[in-house]
Image (cartoon, coloured by chain):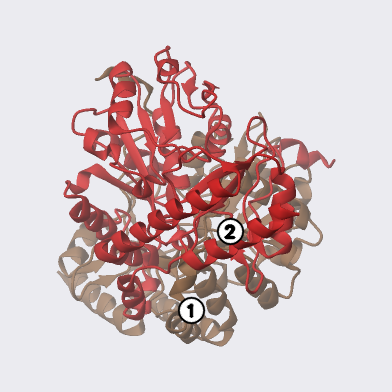
Chain colours: A brown, B red
């Protein structure tokens, strides 16, 4: 090792999730939306003024913040936008989790929470989900420096009704509680409705799943204006220009095209419920997902074997080789046709 | 203050640079390029496949990395891309500056260096530029944990030839040296030519100035593949998807349209030299800028008064109310016509 290498930050080697690009493949591995972005996005792209790119974008991201405020009928001071919900969540960890007490999040959850906690030197504890992968709400009554959990949870897909979220909030008035709602549009009411009563609640959502815009990197947070101001203070203090002009304009167009959003939401939910029935018939079991994926295990066939067999057919799903969940496959909900091909293959495969 | 606010990260309140949007204004305050992006960018935008936005972008940013590698005739393993050079620089600070010894950068320089150092808990010292605003190279021979400086420097515009950069490199083989070349395309040879001999050199550039793409947020680093791998390891460890599909495609198109880039570069340099002559005639003095701005003071008129008078005419320049430089205005080089209007106004104004 060279002398200059001694001061290099050492990180756990990490390979980003497989993003195969095989002609004709069925990509059910990263919870993307099978439908293209809204027609409004295509129109905004066609009308985009490329000459404007020579200028810095608006650091306040006003066009996108205002579109979100209009859509959710809330004041714009309640919104913060970032480069995907990963950027928003990391910024929120950095802004709100500065206690010496550990923050809390489930043992089975989004894999980046412990990464950001380590990055910012935040102590954490991970209360175990119960045997049915449900959050044990009592575990979130101990002393802590903050709470974060996805709802629906990933990769289980289980959704907690607002009453459950509120119970956690009631018990934790002295810390910031972040509800990561990447998949909530496929589930039920957002905890957003609670922010007017719980000023310590931050709700985070993304354009990558229900809004078909993973490629544009857009996420947002909703909370009371004091929380949002703290986030903006931290953001402005070290990088004023993170959102590109294209992301701001296309994101705003996406939000304004609400009808398409609701229509594709419904199609994916219908495909999910239909897929659940078929999987049950084939001997799979799974938590009752309310997300755009199903986290399923088979009564007799190993997940890693099925994963490889599917891959050979150009059908990509996700397998986590981790404690408690290595028997499961996480299958993204695609189009009806894609799900038919998946089920058709599994039916034959399991007959062997 | 509420109890939950006790754990909030406190930052120095900061207002992002003024981004006025007044019809007919002459915007010479943030060193943007007065010319639109290359025709190749407009064409790539017209041909962009919006349906692709439903998928996550390529985490390796290959299309952009390969375009840069082709343009600079270097292996693609020598390139790293990020969301503007601010993102690339912050990532480089975090990756390479983990010594207990202070990093070094000039007292008058890019304002975000101390911000990132504070953010990541990096100790630093700021050797003073000499009276003529030149870097005193001997000051960079003391023990340190790393070195970073812009070349040309901001906001002075002064450029150090590669031989000067090499002298600093020779004396500092045991730390990473970052040369921030945001403005180098308006100046002279890049230090990029030194990376094959100095494996501890990281050169950072941006698309925001010479490439007319401030609105798309694209920056990049060039260094030996070991350095670049370290950067990618840190990036992948906490956020795999920062570059949007649109930024990757438009950035690649921008790089491929090299002819336009060189043409606008020349026009801006010619306008800068012409403006220098006019400013001298009007009683201004300035370091001999090699950037797309001039950092000028007037022999008798105060900078803050001129700043306000220009603003009333819808001409926006930059004034830093900071030690050693509060007598100066930083004037971005615009089109010939814009510079004529600026000079015309100043001529009348200074006659009062």
Asked whether, in this view, residue A273 is left or right of residue B27, the answer is: left
Mark toward the viewer: 2 or 1 = 2
- Local secondary structure at mark 2: helix
Asked whether, in this view, residue A311 is left or right of residue A87, the answer is: left
Q: Residue B204 in the image: state x and y as whole percent.
A: 36, 42
Q: Which of the 4 image quadrants contains residue B317?
A: bottom right
Q: Residue B296 in the image: state x and y as whole percent.
A: 58, 43
In the rendered structure, the residue with mark 2 lies on which chain?
A: B
Query: Would you call the spot at circle 1 few (<14 residues within 10 Å), some (14-19), or many (20 or more)?
Result: some
Asked whether, in this view, residue A20 is left or right of residue A76, the answer is: left
Could one spot residue A289 in this view of the protein?
no
Asked whether, in this view, residue B32 is left or right of residue B163, the answer is: right
Mark linked to residue A269? 1
> A207 or B301, which is in the foreground?
B301
In the rendered structure, the residue with mark 1 lies on which chain?
A: A
Residue at position x 54%, y 54% in the image: A241
> B317 or A299, which is in the foreground?
B317
Where, quadrant-wise, is the C terminus of chain A in this rendering?
Answer: bottom left
Residue at position x 75%, y 60% in the image: A195
- Local secondary structure at mark 1: helix
Measured Cα–Cα span from mark 2 to mark 1: 63 Å
């Amino acid at each position: 090792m060279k002398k200059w290498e001694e001061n290099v930050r050492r990180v756990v080697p990490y390979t980003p999730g497989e993003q195969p690009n095989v002609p004709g493949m069925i990509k059910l591995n990263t919870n993307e939306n099978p439908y293209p972005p809204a027609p409004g996005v295509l129109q905004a792209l066609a009308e985009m003024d490329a000459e404007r790119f020579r200028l810095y974008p608006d650091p306040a991201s006003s066009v996108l913040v205002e579109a979100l405020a209009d859509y959710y009928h809330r004041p714009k001071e309640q919104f913060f936008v970032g480069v995907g919900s990963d950027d928003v969540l990391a910024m929120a960890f950095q802004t709100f989790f500065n206690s010496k007490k550990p923050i809390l999040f489930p043992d089975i959850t989004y894999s980046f929470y412990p990464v950001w906690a380590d990055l910012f030197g935040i102590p954490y504890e991970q209360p175990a989900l119960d045997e049915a992968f449900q959050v044990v709400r009592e575990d979130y009554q101990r002393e802590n420096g903050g709470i974060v959990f996805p709802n629906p949870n990933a990769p289980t897909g289980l959704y907690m009704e607002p009453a459950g979220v509120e119970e956690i909030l009631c018990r934790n008035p002295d810390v910031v509680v972040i509800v990561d709602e990447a998949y909530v549009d496929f589930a039920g009411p957002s905890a957003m409705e609670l922010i007017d009563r719980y000023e310590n609640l931050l709700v985070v959502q993304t354009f990558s799943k229900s809004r078909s815009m993973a490629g544009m990197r857009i996420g947002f947070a909703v909370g009371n204006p004091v929380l949002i101001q703290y986030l903006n203070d931290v953001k402005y203090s070290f990088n004023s220009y993170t959102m590109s002009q294209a992301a701001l304009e296309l994101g705003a167009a996406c939000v304004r095209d609400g009808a398409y959003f609701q229509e594709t939401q419904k199609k994916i939910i219908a495909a999910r419920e239909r897929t659940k029935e078929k999987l049950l018939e084939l001997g799979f079991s799974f938590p009752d997902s309310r997300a755009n994926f199903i986290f399923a295990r088979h009564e007799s066939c190993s997940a890693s074997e099925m994963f490889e067999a599917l891959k050979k057919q150009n059908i990509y799903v996700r397998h986590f080789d981790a404690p408690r969940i290595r028997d499961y496959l996480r299958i993204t909900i695609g189009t009806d046709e894609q799900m038919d091909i998946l089920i058709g293959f599994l039916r034959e495969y399991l007959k062997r």
